[in-house]
């Protein structure tokens, strides 16, 4: 089986995008991509395959995470960047150190066969999908479980940097924003992208995470204003369904997207004069530019 090429494009100081690396190694479509907290590494996960950890500056694959007889279905970083968490095809959740040594594992019905996985910024709560319409919050220390119930089937989810909000993508082509700080509450809905057959992932991003981005089956990346739900941009460029997006945690002007076309694209903000306005919503105050466009 041939290797899969993943293109990484660099945004230069003049706003021009150039090819930086082609990451080769995955044997199946790339389903998950995740930046490390320090912005220097990437985790990528193939469809029921291995997890690969990459050096962004050199394009070198630093480590491969795998478990005999099982495939990985999702991956993510611990907040300290020193451990990796993943969901596996036997519905278990595992934690590895960077060298691949397994440190913790929760077996049994702790995740669906196809599921995202996340951990809160304090490292205490693991978040995953328990059932098709249910998100599980698992407290590692107190061994307490809390649930978020949706009416529609959940496709994927993403945790905000401050661990106070959860973004849930649904089968009905809606993305829901939940507050999980204290009482759980649905506070915003985003619409416009296309999803009918595949798993499509969304994320928070931009300055103070004032934007929401999502992949789409129409080969585009969609970007909304987090506070008011307005659709700001739809970015063409991929030639297949965009499965996953991940906003750079250190550079608010950089966004990565992974596609069925077997490439990963890195998007950068155009250099424009920002028209700032304060927006009060979703429990935060942030400055944003609703007219900012992105370059390929």
Image: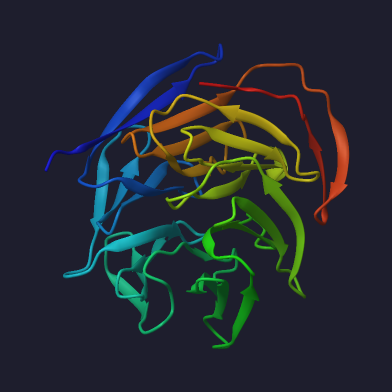
Q: Residue 61, position in %: x, y?
A: 25, 43
Q: Is residue 85 left or right of residue 233?
A: left
Q: Is residue 91 left or right of residue 25?
A: right
Which residue occupies the extreme bottom position in the image? Answer: 143
Classify residue 170 by image quadrant.
bottom right
Query: At 40% from the left edge and 58% from the top edge, which residue is drawn?
Result: 75
Q: Residue 143, position in %: x, y?
A: 54, 88
Q: Residue 245, position in %: x, y?
A: 50, 42
Q: Is residue 267 above or below residue 204?
A: above
Query: At 45% from the left edge and 56% from the top edge, which residue is drawn?
Result: 81
Residue 152 shows up from this direction = yes
Q: Residue 79, position in %: x, y?
A: 52, 60
Considering the image in quadrants, where does the N terminus appear? top left
Residue 124 shows up from this direction = no
Query: At 52% from the left edge and 81% from the top edge, which residue is drawn?
Result: 140
Q: Is residue 122 left or right of residue 116?
A: right
């Amino acid at each position: 089986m041939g290797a899969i090429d993943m293109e990484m494009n660099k945004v230069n100081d003049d706003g021009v995008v150039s090819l930086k690396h082609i990451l080769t190694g995955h044997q199946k479509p790339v389903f998950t991509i995740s930046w490390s907290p320090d912005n220097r590494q990437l985790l990528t996960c193939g469809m029921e395959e291995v997890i690969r950890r990459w050096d962004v500056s050199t394009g070198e694959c630093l480590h491969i995470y795998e478990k005999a007889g099982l495939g990985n279905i999702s991956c993510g970083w611990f907040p300290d960047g020193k451990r990796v968490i993943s969901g596996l095809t036997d519905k278990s959740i595992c934690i590895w150190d960077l060298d691949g040594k397994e440190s913790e594992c929760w077996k049994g019905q702790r995740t669906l066969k196809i599921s995202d996985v996340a951990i809160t910024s304090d490292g205490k709560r693991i978040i995953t999908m328990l059932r098709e319409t249910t998100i599980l919050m698992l407290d590692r220390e107190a061994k307490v479980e809390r649930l978020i119930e949706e009416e529609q089937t959940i496709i994927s989810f993403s945790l905000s940097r401050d661990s106070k909000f959860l973004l849930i993508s649904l089968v009905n082509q809606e993305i829901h924003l939940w507050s999980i700080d204290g009482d759980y509450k649905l506070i915003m809905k985003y619409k416009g992208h296309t999803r009918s057959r595949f798993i499509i992932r969304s994320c928070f991003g931009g300055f103070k995470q004032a934007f929401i981005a999502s992949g789409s089956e129409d080969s585009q990346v969609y970007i909304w204003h987090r506070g008011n739900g307005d659709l700001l941009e739809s970015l063409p460029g991929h030639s297949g369904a965009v499965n996953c997006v991940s906003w750079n945690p250190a550079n608010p002007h950089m966004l990565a997207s992974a596609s069925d076309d077997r490439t990963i694209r890195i998007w950068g903000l155009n250099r424009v004069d920002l028209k700032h306005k304060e927006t009060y919503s979703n429990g935060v105050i942030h400055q944003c530019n609703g007219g900012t466009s992105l370059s390929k």
